[in-house]
Amino acid sequence: MLSQETKVGLLVLAGGMVLSLVVVFLGDIHFQKGYKISILFDDIAGLPEKAPVKIAGVEVGKVLKIKLVKNKASVGVWINSKIKIYSDTKARIISTGVIGTKYLEMTIGSEDKLMLKEGDMIEGINPISFDKMVDRVMGGLDGLMGILESIKGEDALGESFTEILHNTRDITKKINLALGPTENDLRETIISFRNLSKNIEQFSADLKEISGESGETVKKSIQRFDRIAEKLENIMDSFSVISKKIENGEGVIGKLLTDEQSAENLKKTLSNIQSASKEAKKVLRRIGGFKTIWDYRLHYNIDEEEFRNDLGIRIEPNPSKFYYFSVNNIAEKEDSDYDEGDQKINSFSAQIGKRIGHFTFYGGLIRSTGGLGINYYPFNIGNIILNIEAFRFSRKVGQETKAWVNLGGKVKITDWWSLGINGEDLLEQKTISTTLNLTFDDEDLAYLLGLAGLSSAVKR
């Protein structure tokens, strides 16, 4: 066991290390040379600070800070000095997938334009909001349903189709009347064409004796004309048969126009489509912008000389709200002499949190018991977090009731791992532990799964 003086010395040393890391990682200090520019957007569509800046899919910088300037979003970015970007560059916000991880995509621009330098400001290409796109599509569907519902009355749709059928019957009767006396004339005309074609054929035979091959060509042309006349007569007969079937309610079209039950079923189907479109609109609005982060934490308790593991998942519907679920102290065996003063083994956490300015407030289950906590961001960015949380408020220690209180902080070294130090159970045991925290969001997992698939393909 370490003495109290040693513990205090370690805590002071850790505080010095944290302060040094704050200067490096939270002061926007880059080990590579670069320059900063600003890009104006009407809407940043959920682009977070610290998002990557890419050209042709290759990361060349970072989003530093986002602020409001004259009703527009000003996005400050840092660009590697090796990358030369010109004034006609195109900058747009891109989403990597359904979940919607955002990054800033830029182009190099034309070399005959002025090169961007420190402090320059350009206009970005405004993204099309997913919610606005859904509103437009669903608005169109609502308009269509409104037109269909504008037909008043319970049997209005069936009456409309009946009216169409009556109009169709009137048209067919008029066609029959028009073709009545004329139909025989048309047939006689066709027969006359046939007789004429025979006479022309005889004429072509006589002409053959005079013109040889030319006479044969004329004969073939007349034969084609005769076949065309026959087909015309067949088409007229088919049209007459089809119109009678429709009038009698035969076939698919005839039944649709004459059967009132079919009209009623069609009306109900259109109503169901409208209801389904409204539900789909609600679902699409909810899933657009969710971000999922897998969280692994390895704790080492200096006093007890033990390692403990936590595995959790953090779901962010938007940058200021999150849900967190985790299993804590995984796969450890509980001591036979366990009492209320010890940590709970294989415990569970389920929390909801809200970001407000420099603070995040959260509460719910903390290690299988009710609790609450506060995260503090000194510079309003996520590279350093100071934390205090309290839970197990009804814990009995001897004759006293003492809550379990933890106080600590962590520093984000890269986008996916960070280091921290914590004072645990400050009201009773006063132990110190260090933490290694690994986080992977949906984009990181996509890259990892892609590499795993590529490795399997290479092995085969």
Image (cartoon, rainbow, N blue to C red):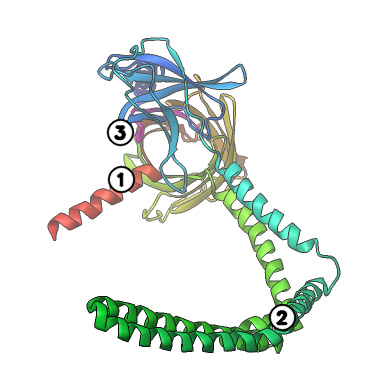
Residue 147 percent location from the top left of the image: 75, 59
Mark 3–mark 2 distance (CA, rounded to whole Å): 70 Å
Quarter of the figure with the C terminus: bottom left
Mark 2–mark 1 distance (CA, rounded to whole Å): 74 Å
**Helix or strand or loop: what does disc 1 sit on?**
helix
Does 309 sit left or right of 139 as displayed? left
Does 3 sit left or right of 127 as displayed? left
Residue that numbered label 3 is attached to: 56
Residue 213 percent location from the top left of the image: 23, 78
| Callout in the foreground (1, 3) | 3
Kindly identify the amino acid type of the residue bearing the numbered disc 1.
Tyr
Query: Could you tell me if residue 295 is visible in this image?
Result: no
Rendered image: mark on residue 447: 1
Kindly identify the amino acid type of the residue bearing the numbered disc 3.
Ala
Residue that numbered label 2 is attached to: 178
- The residue nearer to you, when weighing 254 against 83, is 254
What span is colored magenta in the figure? 405-417
Q: Are marks 1 and 3 in contact (CB under 8 Å)?
A: no
Residue 139 percent location from the top left of the image: 67, 50
10 Å crowding of disc 1: few (<14), some (14-19), many (20+): few
**Helix or strand or loop: what does disc 2 sit on?**
helix
| Callout in the foreground (2, 1) | 2
The numbered mark, 1 or 3, whose residue comes first in the sequence reads 3
